[in-house]
Image (tube, rainbow, N blue to C red):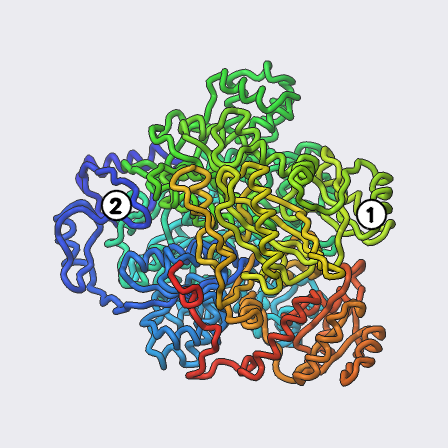
Amino acid sequence: MSLPGLRSSWLRGIARPSVRSFQSSSVTARYAFVPSTPLRAVAAPAVGSYTPKDGEHVLSTPSELARKISAKVLPKLPRPDVKKVVVVGSGGLSIGQAGEFDYSGSQALKALHEEGVEAVLINPNIATWQTSHQLASEVYFLPITVDYVAYVLEKERPDGILLTFGGQSALNVGIELDRMGVLERLGIKVLGTPIRTLEVSEDRDLFVQALKEIDIPVAQSTAVSSVKDALAAAEKIGYPVILRSAFTLGGLGSGFANNPDELSDLSAKSLSLSPQVLIERSMKGWKELEYEVVRDGADNTIICCNMENFDPLGTHTGDSIVVAPSQTLPDDEYHMLRSAALKVIRHLGVVGECNIQYALNPTSREYCVIEVNARLSRSSALASKATGYPLAYTAAKIALGHTLPELPNAVTKTTTACFEPSLDYIVTKIPKWDLAKFSSHVNREVGSSMKSVGEVMAIGRTFEESLQKAIRQVDPRWKGFEAYVAPEDLDKALSKPTDMRLFAIAYAMYKKSYTVDQIHDLTKIDKWYLYKIDNIVQTHHALKAAGSVESIDHDLMLRAKRMGFADAQISDLVNATEDAVRGARKALGITPFVKRIDTLAAEYPAHTNYLYTTYNASQHDVKFDENGTMVLGSGVYRIGSSVEFDWCAVTCARKLRDMGKKTIMINYNPETVSTDFDEADRLYFEELGYERVMDIYELEGAHGAIVSVGGQLPQNIALRLKQTGVNVLGTDPEQIDMAEDRHKFSSVLDSIGVDQPEWCEVTSVEAAKAFADKVSYPVLIRPSYVLSGAAMNVVYAEEELEEKLSMAADVSPLHPVVITKFIDGAQEIDVDAVAYKGKLLVHAISEHVENAGVHSGDATLVLPPFSLNATDMARLKVIADKVAAAFKISGPYNMQVIRKPAENGEEAELKVIECNLRASRSFPFVSKVLGHNFIETATAAITGHQVPEPIDLMAQKRDYTSIKVAQFSWTRLGGADPFLGVEMASTGEVASFGKDIHEAYWASLLSTTGFKVPKANSGVLIGGDVAKPQMAKIAKQLQGLGFKLYCSSPIVEEYLNNIPYVTARRIFFPKADKRKLREVFDEFEIQCVINIARQRGQTFTDEDYVARRNAVDFGLPLLNNAQTAQLFVEALAKKIPQGGLRGYTEGRIPSEVRSWREFVGSRA
């Protein structure tokens, strides 16, 4: 480098201390950079006409000379010769393994597509963008198990396999396939990180040994496989200890133990989930840090991003608030850990991407490595979005034999990928827990086992700004860092973290005047963060002291906005409306600036479309001349709104681009494909609240906004947006409001002659009792405006009504409670449809297996329907027609209909119980099963552009069935009751195809993560409500198949033994002692639990609750609904003769192992 160049770079380093300059191994040439138009899914080729000869690797640079020289200098790596590659996905979204793998898998498929490699994907998650034909040439909706992956490999005969893009599930399957010799026999290359490295990173003993070889300290641990050994190891290490399970994801089955009793309980449970557990020294209170590392086959290694946990060690990193880049590390410590990371990753031989986690003693330089994930992980998705560096895409290219210097930086398109990103902003990730959705039994404390269902990421230029943004993203009811909880025992709430600890800190600072030192002593959170939080507290006090909007001067308003205060938050502090604060702020000339994420901290000219807003700036980075169409995304993954809405948003944005329209995507979820910068012309990684959406709409001069593809969040602000003058495209928000408001909705249904259950709106318990007496119990109680049934309950008796009403009133005190006649034993049907100007274009009718009373998000959906006759199908279409016309719908909508079978030859009653004028969670399912993209049709209807002719898909005959099954995460939520009710509890979904309902259900149920089929002649524990007619059928059939029946209740014992040809044995059932119960299950070889109780367990010792909870804790299949249990037993009866209980055998491929294209008949 010339002297002036050296001097200027040195000055840059001095003048801008907020930006950490990383060593970049790119050859930087001074040329005019040419802005390249963003191409979808294809990185722009490097400039210069020198083309590499065979085996040469060439630097990605605009300089032809540099390309020529590099061809001679860069090592000549042989590229793997692969034409067809199988990518193993991660299955349904569950706690610990969620949407981040949809994003990383999609990136990998994109990279394969660019290289002209045929990609075959195995992933039963039908709701994701990954399982669309745009990316993979063949998709198999089948279980991620060794057997099924082996069947697909046998059928497809690929050249290579990618195992690091499907989370822990894919990794475990890959290691097992290698052990069985399947990969070697079929001649399949493992691309990227070799199997041996995966084994070393997963097996604790091998890992510790490997790190000892290079003198890197590791947490002292002993791997054990029995409770006795665990206790002995802990004696040697000394309490407190942490126990971790090997080969599991998200810290499943891990925890802290302070004494032998705690350890023996914990290890008994963990050993039922994993063959090996690790006992290690507890370093609670140390700092936890993570480095994301990329290494190619030529040993070029870079650190893409380092992240620091706000919470000290002891909280699983998935349940921690995480900040990137690290804020409290001095440079020498940063580099000490950076050097260690490079050394470890090189030694282990990772090829691709991985992350390394450290514990660092806050008072000395002592550190140790906690673990290395030799695959893409949750933090890889976060790091990709935090830096703009597409880790999964790069890892896939590396797996195909590319090296970092020759790959272009996908963001700038002008520099090489062999560089370490610099950030001129701060990113804060906060987890989203949905623990309140579960029974009061669930333990709210967070520790070393992950419990959060999603996460948000906020970008700001100060920690205060990014923290407050993130808090609002987690829950729209929160306006910022305020005291939303008032713990009785404050010190305990601070020292023992729960999902609400951040607000306990707010309460301590605002209401109890705790000092930074006091809070640090209790929480061990670094004081740097606490002082920053104190800045928010002081600004809060200053705003409160101002007293009114008029008294807030320019400086205070600017300070508040720079600290991340929302208009609504300020309005609460000065008793004004949000609009008044917004008006005052704009009058003072204070509006946000739009900044660009370019991976280079603005040191080189870069033309990216990856944007965020901030008040800590003085100019915009972009010109606003595109006037695009805004698509509002779905926000954080939570129970009730998950990856299916991401699929809807991405599909909608792509369709708009196909129509030639410019698109603006707003979303803040780092796990999604919609927040990938090449899915839209402009991506705003921003909040989805009214204030921010209006800011962006006004700045961009947007042509219009689409609110019906992002779930409930955009719907909640739709009417307000319209009233403020936003051009809301598609169905009128006034109509959306009519469908959300029970009174208006009900009167519309009455006016068009569509039936509905009797209902009444009550504001007092007395009125509720009177209505229930009139229509007779059971009744359903629910608050207005709700997503996924929050605080909905079915009530069977008067005393229950009082107790349940108090719960519903807490949810929305401003809204009265609606009480509806609940129809027991009725069937539930889902209708998904699209209309244009009130005329039906396309519709799908799916049938629930479970009776009404199970939330539609938890229900088992069958398409095409299996029991509806032609008359009912025609009547349902008429209802869909009438509703579309009544609400003048242009766009997607969904209805839930109850069907009560007719008594005496008359036609069945059909009653509409709900209607949402937006895309629903079943849209991806119906689109993929019927081979017709409902969202593309909906986008045409919303924009009024290229609207297709109406088509009746349900009239077409199909020779296959598909079944969608909910994915639950009960194992993670200690104490929660695995019971299905009107409150949604599932975290994801899977679906499979089959020639009939039994084959499809078999494949779907096995696709749920962790489902183990019971062995032949093993024991089944049966319990629940003997009044259910299915119990006798289930018992008879199981006995006929050779299973042994056991029960714990004398009532069930008597009932079962009175059935002809059935014998059941009652067993000793210790309700409070988990270890004894485990021994009982082992003694009788119980490998499946069928429990069909009528209601949730009221206490921890309720017999049915204990059976359900322990089935989950011991990793056994649990069937907790009468209809699905019967369907499973029928499927077993068909599968056993076909060898369904035998594992993979060479040469035999079961009939359900067919690709999506083979079932549907075309590349849908």
Name the quadrant containing residue 623. Answer: top left
**Viewer-proximal residue, 74 or 729?**
729
Q: Position of residue 668 (x, y in %)?
A: 49, 42
Q: Which mark is residue 50?
A: none
Q: Position of residue 169 (x, y in %)?
A: 49, 66
Q: Which tag is nearer the camera, tag 2 or tag 1? A: 1
Residue drawn at x 44%, y 67% is 1159
Q: Amino acid at mark 2?
A: Thr
If you read the primary sequence from the N terminus, does the residue marked by circle 2 or circle 1 appear first? Answer: 2
Q: Which mark is residue 415?
A: 2
The answer to whether residue 858 of the structure is visible from this angle is yes
SS at mark 2? loop
Q: Position of residue 225 (x, y in %)?
A: 59, 76
**In this image, 1149 relative to 745: left or right?**
left
Placement of 206 over or under 40, stated as above or below: below
Placement of 722 over or under 660, stated as above or below: above
Placement of 1141 over or under 718, stated as above or below: below
Q: Position of residue 919 (x, y in %)?
A: 53, 46
Query: What residue did someone put label 1 on?
Result: 775
Residue drawn at x 64%, y 34% is 482
**Viewer-proximal residue, 577 or 313?**
577
The answer to whether residue 217 of the structure is visible from this angle is no
SS at mark 1? helix
Residue drawn at x 69%, y 39% is 750
The crowd level at tag 1 (other Cα within 10 Å; few <14, some 14-19, many 20+) is some
Q: Quadrant of the N terminus?
A: top left
Q: Amino acid at mark 1?
A: Val
Total tally of numbered discs in the picture: 2
